[in-house]
Image: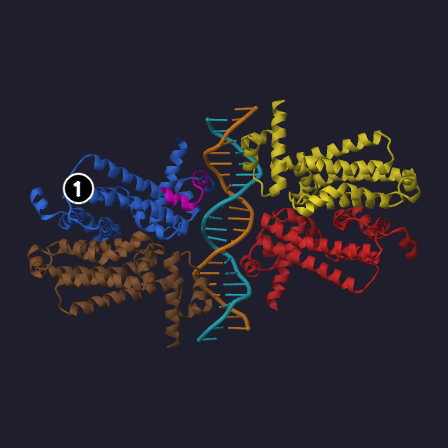
Chain colours: A blue, B brown, C yellow, D red, E cyan, F orange
Amino acid sequence: MTQELLAQKIVAAAARLFAHHGFHRTGMRAISQAAGVSIGGIYHYFKSKEEILLAIVREEVEARLSFLEELRRQDLPVPEQIRRIVEMHFARLEENQDITQLLHHQWRDPSPLLRQKITALYEQLAASLAQLIEEGIAAGQIVPCNSTVAAYALIGLVEGVTQRALAGDAVGEELLKEGPEQLTKILTRWLVPPQEKEAAK
Amino acid sequence: MTQELLAQKIVAAAARLFAHHGFHRTGMRAISQAAGVSIGGIYHYFKSKEEILLAIVREEVEARLSFLEELRRQDLPVPEQIRRIVEMHFARLEENQDITQLLHHQWRDPSPLLRQKITALYEQLAASLAQLIEEGIAAGQIVPCNSTVAAYALIGLVEGVTQRALAGDAVGEELLKEGPEQLTKILTRWLVPPQEKEAAK
Amino acid sequence: MTQELLAQKIVAAAARLFAHHGFHRTGMRAISQAAGVSIGGIYHYFKSKEEILLAIVREEVEARLSFLEELRRQDLPVPEQIRRIVEMHFARLEENQDITQLLHHQWRDPSPLLRQKITALYEQLAASLAQLIEEGIAAGQIVPCNSTVAAYALIGLVEGVTQRALAGDAVGEELLKEGPEQLTKILTRWLVPPQEKEAAK
Amino acid sequence: MTQELLAQKIVAAAARLFAHHGFHRTGMRAISQAAGVSIGGIYHYFKSKEEILLAIVREEVEARLSFLEELRRQDLPVPEQIRRIVEMHFARLEENQDITQLLHHQWRDPSPLLRQKITALYEQLAASLAQLIEEGIAAGQIVPCNSTVAAYALIGLVEGVTQRALAGDAVGEELLKEGPEQLTKILTRWLVPPQEKEAAK
DNA sequence: TATGAATGAGACTTCATTCAT
DNA sequence: AATGAATGAAGTCTCATTCAT
């Protein structure tokens, strides 16, 4: 219990520091101080600095995967599901900027082995989205297209906006405010066939 | 003259190494060997390692900006311009994966000061795209929308696919092959108003 | 009782690990796992890691000292006693390579204080041997010589062979097989006066 | 030139420290200070701390090997050759205690890989001695015996005495003074056949 | 101009030891 | 008595940068 709390504190501290200063520019000393643990203490919970990053990403990916699964159980129309995914993304963004920021682009930095592991995690998200899109196509709720391309395009589309939104300046705030609505519109135009749009009205 | 050639060699070597191993994991020694210059020699052309990265990004951003400017002079319909931008992106991808890969995501790694500089460069691209979109809206060639959101969404959309495309596996090849066509379709559905689509036929 | 058993297990585990990986390269965690005790548990029986090594060496030295004492009580001719010492060394070698290996050369590794303590133990062995040799000289069973030099030469002679014998390769096996007999021959030639040799026939 | 001098200084400093405090208890910081170089500087000449030890041992082994080769060219009787080897060993001992002390027993401490490398070097010495002994046997100058056993026994015999001789106490001084003569006597009795002994008179 | 030896701060990680439970 | 989480000093090594040549 206490142990898990400590691990949580380490992860939280590391996520914040990684997001602000980057993975390499964040030292174990900084993490240990931010988490209120000794340096050695960190190594009881994580075998290495890279493992901390892996834990952060894994946690976040798994949260999203279970969100997707739960969403799917509700049997909503696929366009509505996608709308909710975008909403979730922005909601999570506001409550936890650090980790969200980390999730996407930090994984170029570490060692090849870790990059590979993180990519594998990330892939699960894309695969899950691709499957969702294919189901939508089969149900006539989404226009036929290459679902793999679409999945990565969808992820990139949302990320492209959220990344910039987190800069903390005026443009960022605009994107944060307008983002969800605008993106939903874009996605509807892109993904939903005309007759479905009519029906959606 | 010789100097500029050497600087080019340094930039090329550094770009390749940064893209493959990351900024921090690439040492000056490795760059100097790959470029065939002495370590001291590098410091005649670049004040620091970060300046090399800055030069790489600046060069690439400027190439794209001048491409955009040239494109604009041709007075094509905006959707056609966007199509060509996507094409250009993929073309450049194939001929120079390293720098393209670098352009987008490496900028989390370096120091805050450099990050800021690179972000500023990057912003120019987004601003230019946003302006193009607004012109398209004004001309009725693009559906009305928040041009800033749209610009970042557009960039992210393309990047989301190209990032994954560069992994070098089977999925990557599929994306590389299908990407341009699929993305053009997506963009047409998203950006072009129905009546224009008819006209485009 | 249970305590002593545990202490024995710790000593045995530590001896094996020290012999295989060296004193410094063996961690308390490794010892605790190999002995099936918790780290804290080890500290109930030994004040420090160095005390474990000291205990190992002390035990081994004392075993040899009592062997020597018992041998002396049997009133054998000195050359025969020496022959039995060599035999004992090789016998112990086969049944407990680890500790034998440790006994001789590990003592350079630890701290000055411990080195001194181990050296003192070791010295007892040499002194005992020197005394035996002097008795042999007095009895005319051993050629006159500097008994101190002879004692250390004798120890080194045997160790030189056994050290190499423990490498585990083909040469090692040869030495292990030929060692006792060859060494006995060498020692006879070296130590026993001609007339005694005749008598020994 | 300067470079080699610096490397020599590093080796000398490291040898002294390794001999006095042991390999593991000697830090790179200590070596750098003792050698008057920065820590980083050491790494221009040696890839790692272990490479320093390897260089020390290699140098010493090679010095002895070339001594042996040169000795052999002089076509002396084998017993005389062996006498000179013992003399050389003691002479080198007095002029460079540190390295001599290191040569023999430090190699249990480092990593398995290094231990293997050092053992291989060491083996050359033994092989060279064994060959010398076999030549002596063939020439009737040495009593027939297993030359491998004899070589390791010979090395151990000398080492056993010199190791103890280096302790710096009264016993050590005695061994240092009496050693060469006593050992030569021992070796003559051990190795030289009776008729040769007569002849040697 | 060009070199690369030298610097030394700082990186990650290990480890013997302690102590609250 | 027994545990093992926690400590933090010290370990080896890397690296961007400098400067004498």
Residue A46: percent from left, percent from top: 43, 41
Task: Give the secondary structure at mark 1.
Answer: helix
Using the image, determine if residue F14 lies above or below residue C172: below
D187 up-or-down from D42: above or below: above
Q: Position of residue D172 (x, y in %)?
A: 78, 47
Quadrant in which the N terminus of chain B appears: bottom left
Q: Is residue B143 magenta?
A: no
Q: Is residue C106 visible?
A: yes
Relative placement, left or right, of A145 versus A36 is left
The reply to whether the magenta stretch includes residue A49 is: yes
Task: Please state the total of marks drawn on the protein image.
Answer: 1
User: Magenta span covers which residues?
Assistant: A42-55
Q: Main secondary structure of the magenta part?
A: helix
Q: Position of residue A118 (x, y in %)?
A: 35, 47
Furthest residue toward front: D138
Residue situated furthest top in the rendering: C1
Q: Residue drawn 72% across and 59% down?
A: D65
* Amino acid of disc 1: Val
In terms of depth relative to the viewer, which is nearer, A2 or B88?
Answer: B88
C192 relative position to B53: left or right: right
Residue C41, picture quadrant: top right
Q: Residue B102, image x and y in percent?
A: 33, 59
Q: Is residue C199 left or right of residue B24?
A: right
Decide if residue D129 is on the left or right side of residue D9.
right
The outermost residue toward the bottom is B1
The local crowd at label 1, few if under 14, some if 14 to 19, many if 20 or more residues have their Cα within 10 Å, is many
Q: Return the chain for callout 1.
A: A
Residue at screen point 30% across, 62% down: B94
Q: Front-most of B70 and A154?
A: A154
Answer whether residue B23 is visible to the viewer in this image: no
Residue where numbered disc 1 is placed = A78
| Residue nearest the viewer, comparing C17 with A20 | C17
